[in-house]
Structure formats: C-alpha cells, structure tokens
Image (cartoon, rainbow, N blue to C red):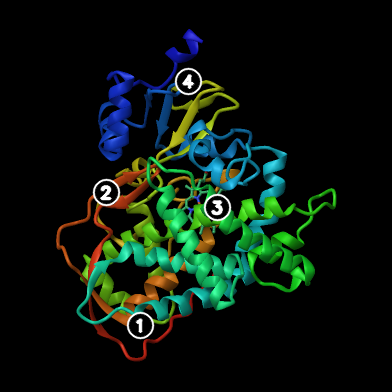
Amino acid sequence: MRESVASLPPGLAEPAVVQTAWWMTRPIQFLECGRRRYGDAFTARFVGAERPFTFISHPDAIRALFTDSRHGLTSVRRARLASLVGTDSIFLIDSGPEHIERRKIVAPGFHGDRIRFSEGVVREVTEREIREWPRGSSFSICPRMQAITVEVIVRAVFGVTEPGRGRQLREMLEELLRRSRKPFQPSLHRLLERIDRLLFAEIAKRRAGDPAEGKDVMSMLVAARFEDGSPMTDREVRNQLMTLLLAGTETTAVSLAWAFDMVLRHPEVLARLREGEEDDAYLRAVVHESLRLRPIVLFTGRRLKSDLQVGEYTVPAGFDAAASPWLTHTRADLYPEPFAFRPERFLGRKPQTYAWIPFGGGVRRCIGAAFAEVEMRVMLDTVVRGISLSLVDPRPERLKPHGMVLFPRKGVPVRVGARVPHPRARVVEPV
Ligand code: HEM
C-alpha cells in the first residue's frame, strides 16, 4: 500500500479537515488551487473518505477512466440518494451486468421518437409558462425553469396527462425536490408515501391496459422484460422513475439558468439566437458552450477496479479517481480563451468525447443527455423568441455549491419586457 500511495499524483498539503471544509465551501477555488500547484492531476484527502481522492483533467486520463467499464461507484454517489430511489436504481447499482441490463431497458426512453414526443411537450409547457410572466415583473429564472422541467418529467416520462393528477403529482415532486435539498431534513416518509400511492396507481393502470401503446417512459418500463423474460416489479418501476426525476429535473433547470445568465450577458449571442436562421446549429452551439463554461456537476468519480495511469503517476485499484468537468473545460490547450463565452467554437464542430464531459462518460454516461440537450434547446429557443428578458443585476452570477451541483447564487434574476406576438418556432433536431 505504501508503494502505491507513493505513486499517486501529488497531494494538497493541508490537513484533511481543512481540505474538506475548503472543498465544501469553495470547490472551484479548491480545484483551481490544485491545478495551479500541480497541473493535470492532484490528490485530495477528505474527512470520512477511506482513501485519497484523485482529480484528473487531461482527456487521455479521462478516456482511460471512462473506458474501463469495470470501474464502480464512489461512496459519495451512494450517500444521499439511496433512501429516495432505492438500491436497485440505475444510478446506484454498481457497474456490471445488472447495471448494463437495466440501462438497456431505460435508455430507449431517451432516444429518437420518444425525444420527438417530449419536444412537443417541452415547447407547450414553456409557452404556457411564459404567458404567465407579466410585463415589467422581475424574478429568479432558476425556479421557473425547475417548474417546467418537473412538468415535463410528469407528462413525458411519468406519462401523467390528466390535469388534476398531474398537478397533484407535480406539487408533491416539487416539494420533494425542495425538501431533499436541505441538509437537516425531518423524515420525508409521509410525502414519499403520498407520491408512491399515486405512482403505484398509475403503474397499475398501465398493467391493466396495453403499456406498449404509451409513448411515456413509465409505459415503456412496465412493458419491458429482462433477458430472462421477467418484468420489473412495481417497486422497481417506481424506483427508476424517481431516479429520472431526481437526476433529470434540477440538473436541467440549473444548466438552463446558467445558459440564460450567459446569453443575456452577451447581446450579440442573444440577437443571433432571436433573429438567426431556421436551422438549429447556433442554438446547439450555445447549449454546448454553456454546458462547457458552466458544467454544473462538480465531478464524475469512479472507484477503480484496475490501476489508472495518469501521466507519470498511477492511481491504484481500490482508490477513487474523478474527472473534473470544470478543470477539463477550462484548459487553455483545449479551449483558447477558456473563460470567454464563445458559442462559435462549437459551430460545425461536435464536442469531443473526453474533452467535453458535462454528462460524464463511458457505461455510466448520463442516460438523459440527449433529452436534456433537446429540453435546453427548446426552452431557450421558446423563451428568447417569445419574450424579451433582461438581467436585473449586471454583475455576473456567482457559483454556489449545493451537494454535487453548482447553482447560480441568486438564481439569475431577470426582468420581463415585451412579448413577441407570433414567434417563429425553430425545428430542433433530436440528435
Ligand atoms: C443538463 C442536464 C443534466 C446534466 C448536466 C446531467 C449530468 C449527469 C452526470 C454528470 C451523470 C454521471 C455520469 C457518469 O457517472 O459518468 C449523470 C447520470 C445520470 N443522469 Fe444525468 N444529467 C442531466 C440530465 C438528465 C436527465 C434529463 C435525465 C433523465 C430524465 C438524467 C438521468 C440520469 C441517470 C439515470 C444517470 C445515471 C446513469 C448511470 O449511472 O448509468 N440526467 N447525469
């Protein structure tokens, strides 16, 4: 063990308790300091972690980390979610055949036709939402984005379209998201029971009818069969749905809030989005650039099953290594003027797999990535073409860590201006 530790990338010198407090309060400053002192990779020590934790940012090391499909989950990933989504959640099952089998079942819910179906839902919900924004009013855009992403999940993923039930479920899910963010949380037991009652009733309805007919993800999960021919139990269908809610709503809403923060600070980008041509290439580039400069997930970690080579160092099997989107996305060798918001860098050029990692990578790459990108494009497009918005505060939003997610500190306060009577809808391609 002594030999292995000696070959780790260099470590921050501060005591573990200082590193932990630093990481929890100012993670970006912490990462920047590691980069300044040690370059491409460095090792941190956190209180409560059994082993040192290595951060990497070079695409070659990230490729090596993501392409070994045997690497498992870090304990950080398990900590918060198990009580809400169950241990058979696709997010929490360790890497291996069981995880792959479940991914095969869940992933088609976020491809091709189903995304096209969801796109219509996203546009309709966003148009309705902005009609309710009075001219001259000011508010933080982040919670409004979250209201939209929750409704989209309720309708497109859970498939609950009946208005009364839909509203009830939406309100309960929003409360769950709000309360689960607080550090000291009295039991969520009662709330979860109410949500479960409604979800189990919906699952029973699908089982009684022909689930293959439904376009929503819940119908798909009910109709699905494992390789041995058995279906998912109701509890597992519920657990995968709750996973999609928790993994897919706040992440998309916060990413969108950041996208608005950046677009509204760059009038030339806003003008091009509003008046640009009908194809969605520029819109797509704006979303890619915004996810580059504001990757909201702090790191994507793995518990190593084999040694990981990082330049001249080796992180041994059994240790944790994590790709840092922030460090990778702000490397000047990959992105000249890395802190400038310049969507043009992605025009006519797809993001590179191991140099653009807002959705992680390998066999655990975000299952909803394509869905999230379409949601972001449609919501951004519908808002900027449908209504005029300006920022309340000219100063850039500051980053505020909350768990693993980087929020805009003030939620991006905006002021509502004139409405555009008949915005042209842009065709947003699903892939
Ligand atoms: C902009 C929005 C989003 C961001 C930034 C994001 C980011 C991520 C990241 C970083 C991971 C971990 C990947 C890894 O370990 O390599 C992940 C996993 C996951 N995400 Fe997303 N996500 C977003 C939206 C969504 C949406 C819309 C859904 C579904 C409705 C979703 C469902 C999932 C699931 C199920 C996993 C676990 C995959 C697995 O372990 O196999 N995410 N996401």
Q: Amino acid at mark 1?
A: Arg
Which comes before the other along the chain, label 1 or label 3? 1
Q: Nearer the viewer, mark 1 or mark 3?
A: 3
What separation in Å lies between label 4 and label 1 (alpha carbons)?
A: 52 Å
Q: Amino acid at mark 4?
A: Glu
Per the rendering, the mark at residue 50 is 4
Are circles 4 and 1 on residues that touch, CB within 8 Å? Answer: no
Residue ID at (49%, 61%): 172
Tag 2, which secondary structure? strand
**Residue named by callout 3:** 192
What separation in Å lies between label 3 and label 4 (alpha carbons)?
A: 32 Å
> Is 139 placed left or right of 308 in the picture?
left
> Is 412 placed left or right of 312 in the picture?
left
State whether residue 214 is above or below residue 68: below
Q: Amino acid at mark 2?
A: Leu
Crowding around mark 4 (Cα neighbors within 10 Å: few <14, some 14 to 19, many 20+) is few
**Residue named by callout 2:** 399
Are circles 3 and 4 on residues that touch, CB within 8 Å? Answer: no
Tag 3, which secondary structure? helix
Q: Position of residue 178 (x, y in %)?
A: 40, 54
**Residue named by callout 1:** 131
Q: Is mark 2 within 8 Å of ligand 1?
A: no
Which comes before the other along the chain, label 2 or label 1? 1
The residue at the far top in this view is 2
The residue at the far bottom in this view is 421
Are circles 2 and 4 on residues that touch, CB within 8 Å? Answer: no
Q: Amino acid at mark 3?
A: Leu
Residue 321 or residue 38, whichever sits in front:
321
Crowding around mark 2 (Cα neighbors within 10 Å: few <14, some 14 to 19, many 20+) is some
What separation in Å lies between label 2 and label 3 (alpha carbons)?
A: 31 Å
